Image (tube, grey):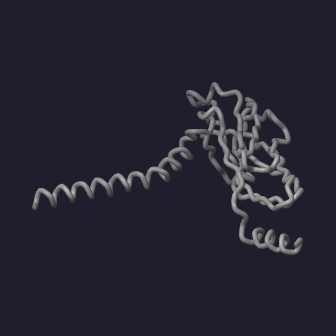
Amino acid sequence: MTATYKTLTLTLSLVFFMGGLAWASVPFYDWFCRVTGFGGVTSTAEVGSGTILDETIKIRFDASVESKMKWSFTPVARTMEIKIGETGLAFYEAYNPTDRVIAGSASYNVTPYQAGGFFTKIDCFCFEEQVLMPGERVQMPVSFYVDPEIVDDSEGKYIHTITLSYTFYEIDLPEKQAALQVETTINRN
């Protein structure tokens, strides 16, 4: 009976250990990507860089929507050249051509991936969900800078162009807008 008890205890311990690793892997991976910029994850800051270099870098802007998302979504300008450390301000335009309220959330990444840790967002429409009324068109800002430490990084110093990409996907309406949508539908009938 002791050998069976030990085997059962070891098996259950292994199951709980593996479950704990699986549970911790998602937040750990998220933390790792934010710290290192791995996978094109950007940094965030409250204010711009205190240092602006004479060197410039080209920023490309890309936009797409998930296949089920009914918005049109494009960058207002496709490229921008800024000094490294300088705060840039870019705009993306979203349009809801449908006859219903749609909420969306944007995911993003930066390429090349090595630039992710140096691309720093100060403020971005992607930090919050967006809700567009039927026929509504909005311009949404993103302010950012490229960390001057990029010029001293063994891989970063060879990066001359960074692409900031966003993909919008539809999400459930917030309660307030969902209630308004139901009320509007009832009033039409």
On the rendered image, what quadrant is the C terminus found in? bottom right
Answer above or below: position of 174 versus 44: below
44 with respect to 2 (left or right): right
Q: Nearer the viewer, residue 102 or 162?
A: 102
Q: How many marks?
A: 0
Q: Which quadrant would residue 51 be assigned to in this image?
A: top right
159 with respect to 153 (left or right): right
84 with respect to 188 (left or right): left
Q: Which quadrant would residue 52 be assigned to in this image?
A: top right
In the displayed orientation, state which residue is furthest to the top.
158
Q: Nearer the viewer, residue 31 or 168?
A: 168
Q: Position of residue 71 (x, y in %)?
A: 80, 50
Q: Position of residue 54 (x, y in %)?
A: 75, 31
Answer above or below: position of 158 versus 140: above
| Residue that appears at 84% across and 53% down | 96
Q: Position of residue 101 (x, y in %)?
A: 81, 62
Q: Nearer the viewer, residue 104 or 121?
A: 104
On the rendered image, what quadrant is the N terminus found in? bottom left
Q: Which quadrant would residue 114 be assigned to in this image?
A: top right
| Residue that appears at 71% across and 51% down | 169
Q: Position of residue 47 (x, y in %)?
A: 70, 51
Answer above or below: position of 106 versus 39: below
| Residue that appears at 55% across and 39% down | 38
| Residue that appears at 42% across and 52% down | 22
In the displayed orientation, state which residue is furthest to the front.
189
